[in-house]
Amino acid sequence: MNPISTEKLDYSHADAVMLEIIDFVKSYNHSQTKEEIHDTLWGTYIFARDAHEGQMRKSWEPYINHPVEAAKILTSIKPDLVTIQACLLHDVPEDTAVTAEMIREVYGNEVANITAGMEKLANPKLRYQWEERTIGSLRKMFFCMVDDIRIIFVKLADRLHNMRTLSHHPDPKKREKIALETLNIYAPIADRLGLFDLKSELETECFKTLHPVEAHQIIEELDELKESQDIFIAQVESMIREIIWAHIPIYSISYRVKSPYSIFKKLDRKDIGHVRDLYDLFAVRIITDNVRHCYEILGDLHSKWKPLPKRFKDYIALPKENGYQSLHTTVVWLISSNRTQPTEIQIRTREMHEHAEIWVAAHFEYSEKGGSVIANDVVWVREIKNILERWEDNTAFFNEMKTQVFDDQIFVFTPKGKVITLPRWASAIDFAYHIHSDVGNHLAFVHINGRNAPIDQPLVNGDVLEIITDSKRQASINWLSLVKTSRARDALKSFLASQNRDELIEKGRMMLASYLEQTFGMILDKDNNLLRVLDGHELTARDKEEIFVQIGNRSRKPSSVVRGIDFLRDMQRSRHAEKSPSNKPNNSVVEEFHPWDTELVIGGEKHIEYHLAACCTPSPGDRIAGYVSHHGVSIHKYNCDELQKCSIERFIEAHWSGQGPKKIELFQVDLELTPPKSSPIKILEHVESLWLTIESFEQQRSGQYYIVSMKLSSYIDDYFLRDRLVARLENIAWVRVIQQKV
């Protein structure tokens, strides 16, 4: 924000836009009179304008233009008056002398709470490096969202207008950071909320900042094609109206063009050079009055033009989990005597269309008593709330959020046609646990699209899965590294903890008894009185059983239990002292009792069964890594040669209790990218797949090339991650590794 101006500012633009907003709200809000709507919104606008009096943006326009333009963006989802008021006031508590409490006194709790939520999200700034403070900021954002989802509506509108005016920011590096933050955080949130127009424009504005040359090229090509597209769609509309029976009402026929950023990704993915070479550049949308007419229109179109196989989707009979309904088909149009063009057609009713455009906004029941608002019918928002409640640790929270928010989703089917939404890369194991925990726990085989398939095979959109269970088959520990959903992971952990408990108790007791006899010549009595007090705490019978379970599943060693029994610990120390050379300091004995010698933590969890690899024989205190095989988790030294031959996807973080995982600063890598096909997205995917964290990411143009510099870190402490990454990057045709710095 620029310093306060001493000159009277011109508010004519803001006044005019505000009147447009009021007129539009009157068109859909019928719960209040037109006079009430005008007085409420205009009064709030004047309040905000007066509070920002004299303040200017970096573009040297009156600051009030920003909240007004954000409010105009917000009207695309037809919000209630409270949301619009909060949007107009969202910067007032932070940037003016007016406090949040003053807003509460004037406008009530709902407006004040949303405004306060926006103020919380203003600091600190998020960055594209997943540090503790960044994750904490994300956590705060989602807490605000589940408390009242309208806060995020306002935040998205605020962010979009800031992106539209980002060119006025004087610092190019900050512009890129803001664009990366928006692309990787806010655009996915808009997508999950079904705000697809907002998501598309956010991506486009980011695209202009991060890839200005490619963005300009694509937008220019789209402009050149617009006239021919308009002619083509006019022909298509005319043909459709001729084909459809006269008794079927058609309210509208329109088309939507792919966003520039979507086009950019597709050109890169398909290795296509020009926009004009894309066949699915746009989709035609037909709006009718009822479901029966949707199917009749579909039949009419298929009788005239040949549909492409496997491209028909009936989301009316089988709606998506978010409630989306529509018929999708792709037909081949004969454009000329020597050219055809496949074109996607969407057919839906007016109600379906409105739901599809702003579905999340239609899921509220706004509070009449001023209470908080949650979109309870929105599955994704409920899942966010569950994750917040389940994970107190920020790192664990973010790992779940990466799966639920920032990864793409896929839609698969049960044999009966029920649609199941899962994260990208989910497998049949996730699917089975989504159905029921017992189905997952006893998963034996899976049929995908009628054929036998591995249970860990990544699923794709449209897969039909049939799960075959066997009561004699049980879930395996190595599944922990394969599942992608929190539901599957929680159910799996619970099952692993409870299985064969009686056997484990007996096994653990025998192992402890054997250790006591061999080490001390002592017998563990029938009532286990030796374990009456451990680490200064008196144990119940249940506590003793749990200790035996831990010993039995090899997540805890008998020696670690012994060190909790005072007189046995003293006895063992005395024996070590007797064996130690007289000139050796006493603290060398103490080193035999490192706190991390007690148990292993694997994948953030204790009590996971494991075995120590014979190839490198790790011992307590060594830096280690876990590898999930068909025989369970094997523990290796971090620099074991055998690990270099293993797939990184099966690694699992492991450390000795008390040692803790530490972020290791690994290296810097500089890359040269060749336009126009260069895409940092593909690079980032490789980085993430190798469990690497991007500490900094900078991109700058050098002649006809882009130079990308990344500083990377990891919680997996193995020295060959760099080699794996470089090898993957060198396989990308348009990437050249310039240098690596340790």
Image (tube, helix red, strand yellow):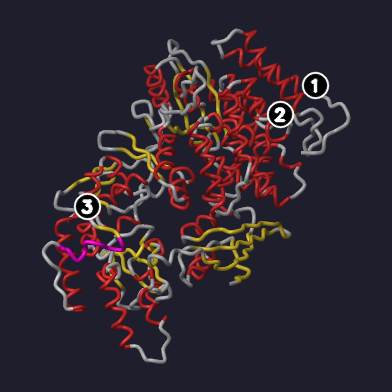
Q: Name the foreground residue: 294 vs 125.
A: 125
Q: Which residue is mark 2?
A: 98
Tell us which disc is closer to us: 2 or 1: 2
Q: Quadrant of residue 577?
A: bottom left
Q: Answer with mark 2 or mark 1, whichever residue precedes in sequence.
A: 1
Crowdedness near tag 3: few (<14), some (14–19) or many (≥20) residues, C-alpha within 10 Å = few
Q: Is residue 74 above or below residue 692?
A: above
Left or right: residue 483 compared with residue 284:
left
Q: Name the foreground residue: 485 vs 331.
A: 485
The kind of secondary structure element at disc 1 is helix
Highlighted range, magenta = 528-536
What is the number of the mark on residue 139? none
Q: Amino acid at mark 3?
A: Ser
Q: Position of residue 38 (x, y in %)?
A: 66, 12
The kind of secondary structure element at disc 3 is helix
Real-space CA distance between mark 1 and mark 3, rounded to the nearest whole angstrom: 69 Å
Q: Amino acid at mark 2?
A: Val
Tell us which disc is closer to us: 2 or 3: 2
Q: Which residue is mark 3?
A: 498
Q: Position of residue 202 (x, y in %)?
A: 61, 38
Q: Is residue 169 above or below residue 68?
A: below
Q: Position of residue 489 (x, y in %)?
A: 33, 49
Q: Name the foreground residue: 19 vs 338.
A: 19
Left or right: residue 225 compared with residue 378:
right
Residue shown at the point (42%, 28%) measured from the top left: 376
- Quadrant for the C terminus in the image: bottom right
Q: Amino acid at mark 1?
A: Ser
The kind of secondary structure element at disc 2 is loop
Residue shown at the point (63%, 53%) measured from the top left: 676
What is the number of the mark on residue 12? 1
Crowdedness near tag 1: few (<14), some (14–19) or many (≥20) residues, C-alpha within 10 Å = few
